Image (tube, rainbow, N blue to C red):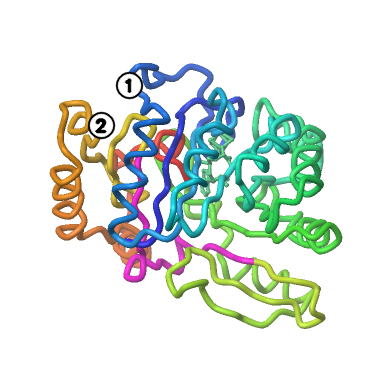
């Protein structure tokens, strides 16, 4: 266990077609969402297992009121090496200074298209200019690195790979391409829409030659590549066609306090119920240890084997929605 991802809310101001396209959805009731105090306690408990990195995500984390107060609490914890946040960027321009002042240094902003109309079509509610303003505001206040996440979908935005790389190189942002995954059940994923890590790499390499650097710490989801001309790096996450279950060290906590050991899990363990029942730190610690030590998740490995043999049916698996789980 090395990385902890905490979803601070399942709510979102976008409706990305590949994540949560539904206008109506049954959101987690507010009293079921972990408070900042509870999140801080959870983080402190996980640190005892050797967690080195904590990433806040969602839903859209910046719609959670006063998120900078949570950042301030977490960044004050001794022994937390790395605190980061993944956001759609829509509210970032107004919050970047507060987040930075509270101790946030690293941020990932999702941007799947640089064409305003396409961006709005993909996110259903997003405005490209707001997101661009958000990432430049983060740069201005000194956040570093700023990584840009793009999900590449065949027939939708696969003609923008080079534009996105050029944008990143020009502005000092690091692009991370993500294979379109069958997370949750709300999207209309099919294998044909997944542009493979190999295809993405070939496109990038044909215009900007790169050399493989490997996975950060040996267990990061992205394989990194550096440009031969020295203009930085990109990362590609190939969780569909190059699964990395065997080196996965990530544990996740949903906004309502469910401990989930795999991005494709069907359910989680109710950590919040345990915490709210008055359990001691030792009791919660023992329960986390039990769950982690009996973990046997290898969903992406199994899926890829089934895909290769022609027997994978996404609809057979009732996975937790990405918007609840956090990416
Ligand atoms: C679930 S979002 C949560 C944080 C924030 N709302 C955002 O969009 O950055 C985290 C990441 O998951 C990615 N994501 C969502 N659905 C995906 C899918 N079906 N396949 C691959 N990546 C996906 C998003 O693009 C985003 O980079
Ligand atoms: S959680 Fe992120 S990826 Fe999902 S709909 Fe919201 S902005 Fe899009």
Rendering coords of residue 323 (x, y %): 46, 35
Q: Please tell me which residue lies in front, 147 or 25.
A: 147
Rendering coords of residue 320 (x, y %): 34, 38
Distance (Cα) linking label 2 and label 1: 8 Å
- Res. 32 mark: 1
Is 127 rendered above or below residue 156?
A: above
Q: Is mark 1 within 8 Å of ligand 2?
A: no
Q: Quick check: is 241 in the magenta stretch? A: yes
Please report the residue visible at 71 percent of the width from the left and 38 percent of the height from the top.
96
Proximity of marks 2 and 1: CB atoms separated by less than 8 Å: yes
Please report the residue visible at 29 percent of the width from the left and 45 percent of the height from the top.
260
**Residue picked out by circle 2:** 272
Say whether residue 89 is left or right of residue 306: right
Residue span colored magenta: 235-253
What is the quadrant of residue 312 in the picture?
bottom left
Secondary structure beneath dot 1 equals helix
């Amino acid at each position: 266990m090395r990385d902890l991802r905490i979803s601070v809310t399942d709510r979102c101001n976008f409706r990305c077609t590949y994540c949560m396209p539904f206008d109506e959805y049954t959101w987690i009731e507010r009293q079921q969402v972990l408070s900042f105090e509870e999140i801080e306690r959870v983080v402190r408990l996980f640190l005892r297992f050797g967690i080195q990195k904590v990433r806040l995500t969602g839903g859209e984390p910046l719609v959670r009121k006063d998120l900078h107060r949570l950042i301030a609490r977490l960044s004050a914890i001794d022994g937390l090496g790395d605190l980061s946040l993944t956001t759609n960027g829509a509210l970032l321009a107004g919050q970047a200074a507060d987040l930075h002042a509270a101790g946030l240094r690293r941020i990932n902003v999702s941007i799947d298209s640089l064409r305003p109309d396409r961006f709005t079509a993909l996110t259903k509610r997003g405005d490209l200019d707001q997101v661009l303003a958000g990432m430049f505001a983060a740069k201005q206040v000194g956040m570093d690195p700023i990584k840009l996440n793009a999900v590449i979908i065949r027939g939708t935005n696969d003609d923008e790979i080079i534009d996105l790389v050029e944008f990143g190189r020009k502005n000092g942002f690091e692009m991370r391409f993500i294979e379109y995954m069958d997370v949750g059940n709300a999207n209309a994923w099919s294998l044909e829409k997944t542009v493979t890590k190999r295809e993405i790499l070939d496109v990038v390499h044909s215009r900007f030659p790169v050399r493989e650097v490997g996975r950060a710490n040996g267990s990061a989801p992205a394989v990194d590549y550096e440009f031969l001309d020295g203009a930085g790096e990109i990362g590609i996450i190939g969780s569909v066609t190059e699964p990395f279950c065997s080196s996965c060290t990530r544990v996740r906590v949903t906004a309502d306090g469910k401990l989930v050991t795999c991005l494709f899990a069907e359910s989680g363990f109710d950590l919040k119920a345990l915490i709210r029942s008055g359990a001691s730190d030792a009791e919660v610690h023992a329960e986390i240890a039990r769950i982690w030590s009996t973990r046997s998740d290898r969903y992406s490995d199994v899926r890829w084997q089934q895909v290769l043999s022609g027997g994978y049916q996404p609809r057979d698996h009732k996975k937790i929605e990405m918007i609840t789980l956090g990416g």
